[in-house]
Image: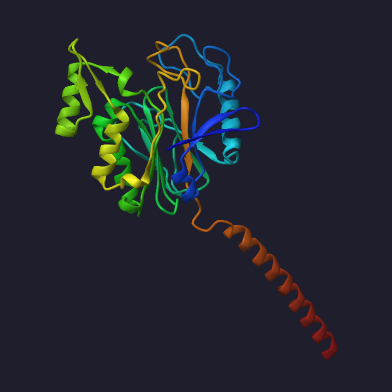
Amino acid sequence: MLERRTTSQGLVYYVSPLLERVGVKHAFSTRIGGVSPPPFDSMNLGNPGGCAVQDDDHHIAQNYRLLQSAIGCADHTRLWVHQVHGGNVAGAMRGETFENGIKADAIVSNDPAKLLAVRVADCVPVLIAGSDGAIVAAVHAGWRGVIAGVVTNAINKMIAAGARTESLVVAVGPGISENVFEIGPEVIDEFQRVFGSDAPTRRTADGKGRVDLQRAITIQLNRAGVLSSQIDATDRCTFRDQAEFFSHRRDRGITGRMAALIAARSKCPGLFDELDSFLAILGDAEETIQAASLDDLKQLR
């Protein structure tokens, strides 16, 4: 179960105990502890699309700085994508060039200098890491993304980069809950097509229905080979828990965005510091040898 954290400055976010054990820096943000004014109060990390009411970009940038500092990632380069509610996964592997704003709904990386970010305001954020934290993924999963298999696609990209499915650790973040996520019959049909008898949907008397996105994602994780014991979840609902979260549906589009962030862990923490120390010692030794050699040459004159 995700755990709530509050900084001394009042910034509130959630973390996964499973991901913490792996050693990866990460967070699921809330709306609490930022600098943005209403209706984006206050930890707003993105503007709504197609809406005349917008938060100031400087507020959003400052909010990211506050959150990144809180989780120890102030010096990381943040990567983000133009989310389109699909199944595409962007790669940001070590040594590769990455262009922010490309169309995708997930990012996979093994570069510990990069911080992956996806934005949500009812859709479900999913963070994934290998057992050693050396490769990670951040996923934006709305109902269309779930149908498109974005979570499974992210896992497949991680496996192609060397991760093992059975060792993956996953945190499924806060999103809109089943009780308040009304969908049309055509969406129910799509979930039944993809999930069959396991479809986490129910029809209501008015001909519409409800879907449990978190459950759908868990089913896809299990089908991909991820163990249930390796999945952290939450009972928080972005629609219901207004004091903590922005909600596109509840606020009729005029609202802010939360973010889910994750960074890969270096396979050799402190290696470069130790290497610098070794080279410094080697340099001192080389100077000593050179000085001794000069003294020997002088004595031979």
Q: Which residue is drawn at 55% across and 29% down?
A: 12
In the image, residue 239 sits, relative to residue 69, either above or below, namely: above
In the image, residue 96 sits, relative to residue 194, either above or below, namely: below
Q: Is residue 30 left or right of residue 122?
A: right
Image quadrant in which you'd find residue 204: top left
Q: Is residue 194 visible?
A: yes
Q: Position of residue 150 (x, y in %)?
A: 30, 35
Q: In this view, does 292 lie to the left or right of 188?
A: right
Q: Position of residue 3 (x, y in %)?
A: 49, 36
Question: Which residue appears farthest toward the bottom when viewing the image?
Answer: 300
Q: Which residue is drawn at 31% across and 47% down?
A: 227
Q: Nearer the viewer, residue 124 or 113?
A: 124
Q: Quadrant of the C terminus?
A: bottom right
Q: Which residue is drawn at 40% across and 24% down?
A: 237
Q: Position of residue 208 (x, y in %)?
A: 20, 14
Q: Can residue 87 be seen in this view?
A: no
Q: Which residue is drawn at 22% across and 25% down?
A: 201
Image quadrant in which you'd find residue 123: top left
Q: Where is residue 250 in the image (x, y as percent from the top left)?
A: 40, 13
Q: Quadrant of the N terminus?
A: top left
In the image, residue 38 sits, relative to residue 152, either above or below, namely: above
How many numbered marks are there? Answer: 0
**Colour approach in the figure:** rainbow
